Image (cartoon, rainbow, N blue to C red):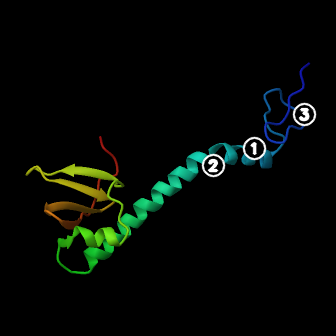
Amino acid sequence: METKTCLCCQQNLLGRTDKKFCDDYCRSTFNNQSNSGINKQLRLINAVLKKNRKILEALYNENKERQKTIIERKIQELGFVFNFHTHIEQFENGQTCYYCYEYGYYPIKQGELTIIKVNGLPLSHD
């Protein structure tokens, strides 16, 4: 009979024939190590998205108007990363709006953006 070893600590396993780990600690450690690269990448992406959202929110709230026009350079100086957004919407007039969660922006003319906030985003697409 072949002796199986724990995938984490390499100790001999006793018990069920399909057992892979000697205890919960080894199972958890093994899975955390296996997923650490993927989770790190997700954390970095989420950090950029959250920062972008925070910047849009702050600029939107500077003025109580429904829409807020700003200079593109100002948003860049605050650390906004333009290639990171949660979704894109094409308006009927052909304008493209880029969103970070409920805050969005679209270019109106060279070097100027309009920031908008939408309420009630759909949680799923049927």
Precedes in sequence: disc 1 or disc 2: 1
Residue behind mark 2:
36
Q: Quadrant of residue 82?
A: bottom left
Residue behind mark 3:
14
Report the amino acid beneath label 2: Ser
Residue at the left extreme, as displayed: 93
Where is residue 36 drawn, in percent x and y?
63, 48
Local secondary structure at mark 3: loop
Q: Answer yes or no: do the residues labelled 1 and 2 have beta carbons within 8 Å?
A: no
Where is residue 68 drawn, in percent x and y?
19, 73
Q: Quadrant of residue 11?
A: top right
- Say which residue appears at 14% left-offset and 52% top-offset: 91
The vertical placement of 8 against 121, above or below, is above
- Say which residue appears at 38% left-offset and 68% top-offset: 79
**Front one among 58 and 113:** 113
Local secondary structure at mark 2: helix
Residue behind mark 1:
27
